[in-house]
Amino acid sequence: YRVGSTEFSDVFKYFNINRKMTPFASDIITRLSVTLGSYKEAADTIELIGCGKISISKLRTETICIGEEELLASRNPPMDIRYYSKTKLKTPKDAHQVEPTLVIMSDGTNVPCVKTDTVGIRGKNSEQAKSRQIRIVSGSEYIYVTNKGIPIPIKGSFSYAVTDLGIEDFTSLIHNHAVARGSGTVSRVQCVADGEEALEKAMRDALPFAEFTNDFMHASSYLNTCCEKLGIDNHLKEYKTCRSIMLRHGAGSVVDRIKRLYTDKLATSKESRDALNYLDKRRNNMRYGWLRKNGYYISSCHIEAAARILVARRCKQAGMHWRHHNVACVCAIIAKIRSAQ
């Protein structure tokens, strides 16, 4: 420590000290703050390993400050073209090669927030919201798929970014993240997301040349609802049959089958019609047979896993309530850690 203002101290500037902390110390305490269960746990761990005592408020202040820097950096990221060793590019067993593909996935997850940040925000059923959304985008690459058509991502190819901004700003985040990962230099680009219309529009606006795909599991959920609400005997058997058809061919074949076989049932069940219309509207995004044949993803599994790792694991524990901006700062640091090669 040095007596006096640290802002104008030549000693602090020489050692690159900000907020009375070296860069290495800042990196260590922020990593502990976002990877352990709480700020208190991080402070206790620092003391336990013999690095001295540090207040919880100091930990929190430093974490939010670094998180804000990461949020700003993620909006205009530097180029992140990755090169891989021969070991990582070795052909896996029972796999074959396809054109190099960049996959951009996106999703959103809600985090419980304090009332200050939820006032005037409407949630489900037009009730007062109790949470706010954090949006996530990921990028990865692959050049091999299994003999069943499942892509095998290259180890060390994943990168992530998060934001607390609205959907209109999320478009630019997706675009900038994809450009940084080399979307203009690879043979193929695929975008994968669930069926949220605003999210689909954002991804299409960001990457209009990419192959856009809706997640198979979300499509299966709507298909199950459609079959269940038809009021037919053994609707589970019909669902399994339609799901197999959708996996082999696509949502369009299933929609045509149900419309042909259950016209009367659809006329009397609004829930079935709505679920079927969801699939019909997105049939061009659900050509699962073609996608598997050509070595594309049909699932958004990686971004859903990212939502758990980047957000839920640290920020959605029992009893937690956050300021919306603060939770985005914490998640931005985790995203940077997870993006490291």
Image (cartoon, rainbow, N blue to C red):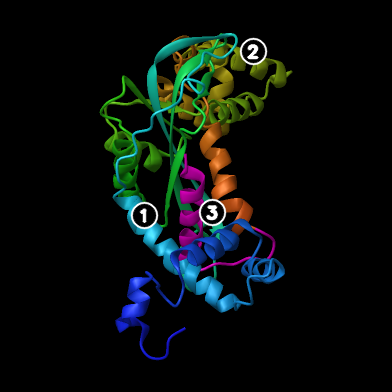
The secondary structure type at the circle numbered 3 is: strand
In this rendering, the label closer to the viewer, 2 or 1: 1
Q: Label 1 is placed on what type of residue?
A: Gly
The secondary structure type at the circle numbered 1 is: loop
Q: Label 2 is placed on what type of residue?
A: Thr
Within 10 angstroms of label 3, few (less than 14), some, or many (20 or more) residues? some
Q: Are marks 2 and 3 in contact (CB under 8 Å)?
A: no
Q: Name the residue under label 3.
A: 110
* Image vertical order of residue 297 relative to residue 294, above or below: below
Residue 212's x, y, as percent? 38, 27
Does label 1 or label 3 sit earlier along the sequence?
A: 3
Q: Looking at the rendered structure, which numbered label has been put on residue 195?
A: none
Magenta-tinted stretch: 317-341
Q: Mark 2 points at which residue?
A: 241
Can you see residue 242? yes
Q: Nearer the viewer, residue 152 or 205?
A: 152
